[in-house]
Amino acid sequence: MLPNSYEKEKAKPEEVLAATLGYQFNSKSPKGSKVEISKNTGRPKHAFLKGKLLGTFRPYDGFFLPTMDGAKLLKMKKIEVKDNDAAKFVSQGKQLFAKFATPKMPIGTRRSEISISTNMIFPGEEVSVTHKGKIIAVGRALLNSEEMQQMKRGVAVEVRSHVKIEPDQYDKFLHVAQKQKMKELWDNKEDEAWEDA
């Protein structure tokens, strides 16, 4: 037994969250996030922000599994679904097939930062699925980026969490998302300054 002064200090739950998010997603921990500890194991179990569940720590390896709310705050690697019908299925919790998957760069990544580690999706990674810029699901990639682009069969992403909307309400949901995106583009002050120059 080592003296108390030599004993390794245990990391705080919020420090574990920050380190995990940095390692997995190259993201900072959202300010004000709280971590729930498991009573059985004493390890981090869930992460919350203002009462909303951001994600769960996988018990056997400590990896972070984001929810829909968590995906909006993290720089996750994204897979775009361009086909409207495929997007409807994914938004209902169905798996995403390779023929409809288009890997994208994470938001906030600069061209100078592009490397294999940032633009390549690997099997087992947590990814978000988007349609016309809106996150519709999160899950685990089963194929890498090249396989998604080349394969015409097989599941690309195993969906774990998805938007909670009814099938007949999807078009309305998409219209609201597009309307919000257009407003952001129209209200862009940098573009206005460039036009006035």
Image (tube, rainbow, N blue to C red):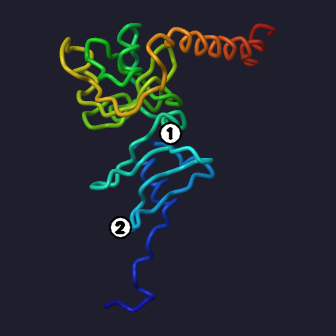
- Asked if the residue at tag 2 contacts the one at tag 1, i.e. Cβ–Cβ closer than 8 Å, the answer is no
> Residue 40: which numbered mark, if any?
2
Q: What's under tag 2, amino acid-wise? A: Asn
Of labels 1 and 2, the one closer to you:
2
Report x, y in % for residue 110: 51, 28
Q: How far apart are the alpha carbons under marks 1 and 2? A: 25 Å
Q: Which residue is mark 1?
A: 70
The residue at the point 59 percent across, 48 percent down is 51
The residue at the point 49 percent across, 30 percent down is 109
Give the quadrant of residue 94. top left
Residue 125 in the image: above or below residue 56: above
Residue 124 relative to residue 183: left or right:
left
Nearest the viewer among 24 and 53 is: 53
Report x, y in % for residue 47: 49, 51
View extreme (right): residue: 196
Tell me the crowding category of disc 2: few under 14, some 14 to 19, or many 20 or more residues within 10 angstroms, Cα based.
few
Q: What's under tag 1, amino acid-wise? A: Gly
Circle 1 — which element?
A: helix
Nearest the viewer among 42 and 167 is: 167
The residue at the point 45 percent across, 38 percent down is 67
Pointer 1 or 2: first along the chain? 2
Circle 2 — which element?
A: loop
